[in-house]
Image: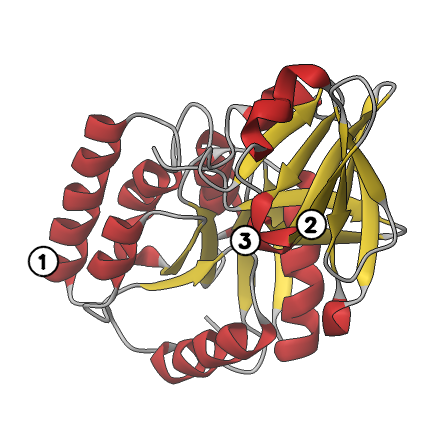
Amino acid sequence: MSLDHPTALIADDEPLLREELTRLLAEAWPALEIVAQARNGREAVEMFEALQPDICFLDVHMPGVSGVEAARQIGRRAHLVFVTAFDQYALKAFEHGVLDYLVKPVEPARLADTVSRLQERLGAALPAQATEALLQQLAQHLQQRGTRPSDGPLRWIRASVGPSLRLIPVDEIDFLRSDEKYTLIAWRGDGGQPAEALIRTPLKELLVQLDASQFAQVHRSVVVNLKAVSHVTRGLNETADIHLKGRREVLPVSRSYLHLFKQM
């Protein structure tokens, strides 16, 4: 291990997320060399055995061998950082301080804190019993809950905007609209300004993952965030139009969904 030239491995089943974390690490820790990128836990273990990096960034939930299972095989031979989306149980477990974690979408300030701790820990041995016990506890928890990151509603959506990957918080989405083979995501971007992106996931697949108390289908091709609704105007033939806060778009409400706004 070289304290001047540390090395790391990143494991995530999403290529764009691997690239985004690589970019953020290059900014936060220029001396760190990313020597491998794995698509799953099995690849992570194989690459670790071949390259012996100092640090492993492991997505908790990956198909096949999970990040936690991979970490158990790597053990004390590397400093471990888990990357997780929702799992509050895991976050509480990591608070013991033996292992570190990052929450998706990764924020530069949080990553800077993690980098600072890793720089302090390089060259120091991890407490074996505490680490192994925690990893076993996390692995058992994942087995009980299955491979899904969370049983709750969707909290963020990945979308490519130009050359960049955007991780859009669901709470910031105003509406979603089916657009041929794509789904248009309309949300509040930087500074609260209206922004849009297209993703390949069909609207019907997203709908079942959204919080039904917050998002409502108002047309066969439109789902709206009820918190973004300014007012509703009634039209002819038992239809209506939705006006949004701070946006010019007017969304149609078809007859089948008009009952949602009877009290508005």
Q: Amino acid at mark 1?
A: Gln
Instruction: Look at mark 2 in the image and give the residue it sits on.
Output: 231
Q: Position of residue 109 (x, y in %)?
A: 55, 79
Instruction: Tell me the CA gap for discs 3 and 1.
Output: 24 Å
102 vs 249: above or below: below
User: Of discs 3 and 2, which sits in the foreground?
Assistant: 2
Q: CA distance from mark 2 to mark 1?
A: 58 Å
Label 2 crowd (10 A; few <14 / some 14-19 / many >=20): few
Residue 30 seen in this snapshot:
no
Which quarter of the image is occupied by the N terminus? bottom left
According to the picture, the residue beneath numbered tag 1 turns out to be 129
Which residue is disc 3 drawn over?
A: 9
Tell me, yes or no, if residue 104 can be seen here.
yes
Query: Of the residues under marks 3 and 2, which one precedes in the sequence?
Result: 3
Quadrant hosting residue 23:
bottom right
Check disc 3 and give the amino acid type.
Answer: Leu
Residue 158: mark in rendering: none
In this rendering, the answer to whether 195 lies above or below 207 is below
Would you say 146 lies left or right of 38 here? left
Residue at x 26% of width, y 34% of height = 142
Gap between marks 3 and 2, in whole Å?
50 Å
Asked if disc 2 and disc 1 are in contact, CB closer than 8 Å, the reply is: no
Of the numbered discs 3 and 1, the one sitting upstream in the chain is 3
The residue that appears at 30% across and 25% down in the rendered structure is 146
Which residue occupies 68% across, 40% down?
Answer: 15
Instruction: Where is residue 51? Give x, y as percent.
Output: 53, 50
The amino acid on which the numbered mark 2 sits, given as a three-letter code, is His
